[in-house]
Amino acid sequence: MAQKDAASSSKLWGGRFAEDPDPQMRALNDSIRFDRRLYYQDITASMAYARALARAGVIQSDEADQLERGLTAVLAEFEGGLFAVAEGDEDIHTAVERRLSELVGDIAGKLHTGRSRNDQVATDLRLWLREAFATIAALVVDLQRTLIGQAEANLETIMPGYTHLQPAQPITAAHWLMSFFWMLQRDHERLAAFGHRGNLSPLGSSALAGIPYPLDRAALAADMGFDGVTRNSLDAVSDRDSVAEFLFAASLLGVHLSRLAEDVILYSNPAFGFIELPDAYSTGSSLMPQKRNADPMELARGKTGRVIGHLTGLLTTLKGLPSGYNKDLQEDKEPLFDTYDTLTTLLPVVAGMVRTMQLVPDRMRAALQPAMLATELADWLVMAKGVPFRQAHHLVGEVVRVAEEHGVSLEALSLDLYHSVSSHFDSSVYGVLDFDAAVARRTASGGTSPVAVAAQIEQARKLLPEA
Ligand code: ARG
């Protein structure tokens, strides 16, 4: 068992301990390895806290100045890559305070007055999350713009639309691309809303019970750019809702990216041939010279699994916690940072893929099958002949069966055979069987016609911030 040495007496919580912590327990307990990433938030929040202590008369204003100067120097060490983590630095909070005391002496000990690492880490995280929400939202907007760009270039491009991955009805490629715009628009709005909701300051909650000093929490919060203060100190020190909301917003965003990725993977398969993958965003095989793979899209799909895992992990960590801070909460940071890093790496690559992939209109058109116009025939029976839709649906079903029996497509089926199903059919059915006309008819808002999609794009543009 290690004897307590001189250095450990300066430890933040060393007073009541006679012996040093076991090295293996420290390897488990210490978080400096990953939470040093919060240095900027930790130091700037400490500067604001020093100013608040001075305003409350808890410390002198020249003491606050000294603390702030010292903290500025510590910050510069981090920014310059010069900060040296010392033996005994447990986490970012203890590391900063240890270095501050080396620089400004005993007065550093006044900074922690009334403060606990519990409200400190909650504050640091919220400050960090504020930026994180905004950064991811901005990357989502970049991808949205890219989708609009490809959609505008393909307003008139017609492709098969699928349900159950079976050919369903013709749609425009712009319509397909814009469907992802709207998924991402919800993500972008969700990120903004969650970022806003979490922008409250826990500082002044102390360990759990609040602070006995006359600290103006609202002024302190405003100093840090928060919109207000948390309402209950016991809740505030263990509230990780913002982390969970970030991971949820990230997971759902991931789900959308993954679905886009799946379409690109499928449509770039030569059996479809709708998309040609760009060199810059595809890879080859070390064995098969002909191969071109959509690896970044497979990674979008794969990494989404990992992000959803982080959300599940955090919720599982939170669900059984008793009131107040518990060390389990230290497990919030690695999934949070990993999710952020995953998305900041992934989103620009997905945008690059969308921007540079080549759609192949000829292959899309070649994949259209006349049977995809069966609904048009039913609609024609309704509109031109006044047949109730249910009956029209049934009659066209019979037509499809007869065409299959004779091994011909709907447009090649003779008028006699149409008549064998119903006398409602006349030669104008052949005019109905037209892919472009089928698409062009769907002009109602939200529909696939070039006119409706152009209107959709117009609306979409208005939702994005100025470029
Ligand atoms: N490193 C800790 C965390 O990330 C900081 C809070 C520690 N608080 C405590 N009472 N031990 O959660």
Image (cartoon, rainbow, N blue to C red):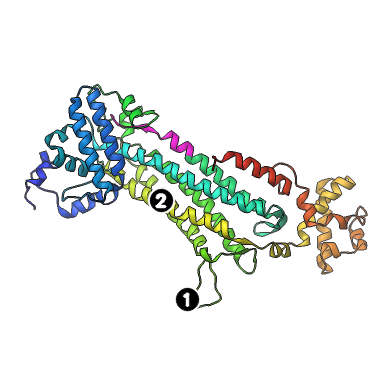
- Closer-to-camera residue (401/367): 367
- Closer-to-camera residue (405/33): 33
Cα separation, mark 1 vs mark 2, equals 30 Å
Asked whether residue 358 is drawn in magenta, I would say no
Q: Label 1 belongs to which residue? A: 286
Question: Whereabouts is ligand 1, in terms of quadrant?
Answer: top left
Residue 431 shows up from this direction: yes
Horizontal side of 388 relative to 203 (left or right) equals right
- Closer-to-camera residue (314/91): 91
Q: Position of residue 413 (x, y in %)?
A: 87, 64
Q: Residue at x 90, y 63 (%)?
A: 417
Range drawn in magenta: 192-204
Q: Quadrant of the image for the C terminus?
A: top right
Q: Residue at x 55, y 46 (%)?
A: 184
Asked whether residue 201 is drawn in magenta, I would say yes
Tag shown at residue 339: 2
Please say if 349 is above or below 291.
above
Circle 2 SS class = helix
- Closer-to-camera residue (142/194): 142
Q: Are marks 1 and 2 in contact (CB under 8 Å)?
A: no
* Type of amino acid under label 2: Thr
Across the whole image, how many numbered discs are drawn on residues?
A: 2
Q: Residue at x 64, y 52 (%)?
A: 151
Q: Position of residue 418 (x, y in %)?
A: 89, 59
Horizontal side of 404 relative to 233 (left or right) equals right
Q: Position of residue 75 (x, y in %)?
A: 26, 42
Residue 446 shows up from this direction: no
Horizontal side of 296 relative to 271 (left or right) equals left
